Image (cartoon, grey):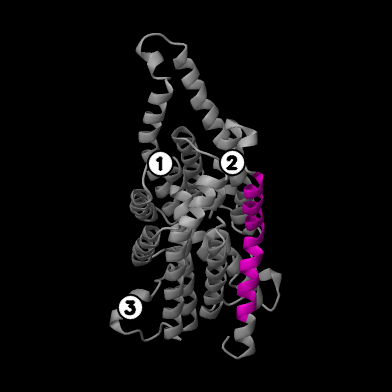
Amino acid sequence: MLTLVLVVILAALVFEFINGFHDTANSIATVVATKVLSPGQAVMLAAIMNLVGALTGTAVAKTIASGLIDTGVVEVTSQVILCALLGGIVWNLITWWKGLPSSSSHALIGGLCGAALAAAHNDWGALIWSEAVGDWTKNKGILWKVVVPMISSPIAGFLLGIGVMLLLWGLIALLSRATGWLRRLARPNFVNKFFGKAQIISAAYMGYAHGHNDAQKTMGIIALTLFGAEASGALNDLPDWLAFLHPGSAGEQDIATWIVLTCAVVMALGTASGGWKIIKTLGHKMVKLHPINGFAAETSSATILTVAAHFGMPVSTTHSISTAIMGVGFAKNPRALKFSVVERIIWAWILTIPAAGGIAYGLLKLLQAIGWA
């Protein structure tokens, strides 16, 4: 049993690494597309800021660990979590291979729900659908922590992208009507140079927000694994050098420091390995971007991710940056958006949770059939 727990933790870290290179594109696509940074410079910036972001909170991790699956209905065993992770990993690799910016967050959530449903023998009560506690920001369940942000974050990304873009253009228009040196600030050459520098800051903000939200999801999975292992007795009589695996009396309500540090470093390493296929889709195929557009998209997306992480909502980095780019492109020229690319991305969004969930469900049923679960 202990060996299985260690295998699950390893699989979780593999998922975190893949999340790093799969979602690297989300945090650096715009800064590469606008040629403000080279791909190598952008990847290193994202890796460093992912690490910083991953070390600054655990609210999303606690949602994954205790807010989606009813452990009173289904036992969340190591096999369940392993199949959940494999469902997310397989779907991530498929979409990466196809160059589609699908959501690693939703792949993981879909895998977790699919595996839990299989373990509960199709008892849908195993999933926490909605658990209200008065303050909606603290509510648990798939409705509040997955569905609401899944719908609202793309809309917010699109509208905020438009709003920030219009605000920046409004400021430039005001400067162009001014006199003296202020008027010079509105010249295209100065605007491009200024936002070329400013986009380095917005790209760093985006990298921070990605780590702050996404890295926490694997932290939650590892905490959930250890909580289940402790409850089943798999961690009894641990050797001294593995004593850190005990989750403690708080269980999954408290994310151990070693989990936070490990996930942060692994995501940063994954980020450093890059994900160029998705960068091409987001940064080049969807709409042509200039530094001011990249700044607007990154600032909009990063703000959504940071706010969502504060409330423990595992929001998709992919959804927020993709729709922010769409919003910026729409503000620029509605006809500039390449809707065939947008359509492919939307289909990837729609399919991610059921596809990853289906893979995880099938894997656990296979393990049950051969007596391994």
Quadrant of residue 131 in the image?
Answer: bottom right
**Identity of the residue drawn at 60% across and 45% down:** 154
**Identity of the residue drawn at 41% across and 70% down:** 249
Outermost residue, top side: 179
Query: Alpha-carbon distance for marks 1 and 2?
Result: 19 Å
**Is residue 256 something that shows in the picture?**
yes
Outermost residue, left side: 241
Q: Residues within 10 Å of mark 2 (few under 14, many from 20)?
A: many
Q: Earlier in the sequence, mark 1 or mark 2?
A: 1
Q: Earlier in the sequence, mark 3 or mark 2?
A: 3
Q: Please give the range of residues in magenta.
A: 339-364
Query: Alpha-carbon distance for marks 3 and 2?
Result: 49 Å
The residue indicated by pointer 3 is 243
Q: Amino acid at mark 2?
A: Met
The residue indicated by pointer 1 is 35
Quadrant of residue 126 in the image?
Answer: bottom right
Q: In the rendering, at what x and y percent does residue 63 appear?
A: 52, 59
Q: Which element is circle 2 on?
A: helix
348 inside magenta stretch: yes
**Identity of the residue drawn at 60% across and 48% down:** 136
Q: Amino acid at mark 3?
A: Ala
Of 31 and 321, which appears nearest the observer? 31
